[in-house]
Image: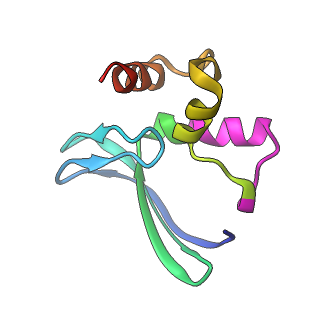
């Protein structure tokens, strides 16, 4: 899957609850988060993410040399590598995954 064009990437305040595309946890109503819209292989896609989750996802992909077609979502990094991939992550990011794994 190739990411052709990111045409909108901005911090927004949610008017309702959303799901973070990185950690798959809830983004609460009125919480500031990242909204990103892009065209991928000719298809319009929109994502909402906790900003700190997105930052950690980008960091992990860069550390592993993963770009474009090989780009891996944060939740897949954790599924494949366990909580160890979150060892240096911000506390809020780690806590979202601990909460998810306990459920």
Residue 66: percent from the left, percent from the top?
Answer: 77, 48
* Image quadrant in which the N terminus is located: bottom right
Residue that lies at the very extreme toward the right in this rendered image? 65
* In the depicted structure, whether residue 57 falls above or below residue 69: above
Q: How many marks?
A: 0
Residue 75: percent from the left, percent from the top?
Answer: 52, 38
Q: Is residue 64 magenta?
A: yes
- Dominant secondary-structure state across the stretch colored magenta: helix
Q: Which residues are magenta?
A: 55-69
Residue at the image position 38 percent from the left and 45 percent from the top: 20
- Occupied quadrant, residue 96: top left
* In the depicted structure, whether residue 77 falls above or below residue 81: below
Residue at the image position 73 percent from the left and 62 percent from the top: 69
Residue at the image position 57 percent from the left and 40 percent from the top: 76
Q: Is residue 83 left or right of residue 62?
A: left
Q: Is residue 59 magenta?
A: yes
- Occupied quadrant, residue 10: bottom left
């Amino acid at each position: 899957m190739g990411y052709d064009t990111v045409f909108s990437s901005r911090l927004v305040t949610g008017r309702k609850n959303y799901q973070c595309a990185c950690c798959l946890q809830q983004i609460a109503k009125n919480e500031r988060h990242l909204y990103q819209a892009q065209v991928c292989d000719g298809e319009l896609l929109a994502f909402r993410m906790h900003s700190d989750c997105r930052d950690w996802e980008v960091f992990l992909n860069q550390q592993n040399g993963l770009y474009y077609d090989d780009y891996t979502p944060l939740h897949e990094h954790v599924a494949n590598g366990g909580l160890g991939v979150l060892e240096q992550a911000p506390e809020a990011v780690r806590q979202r995954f601990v909460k998810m794994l306990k459920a």
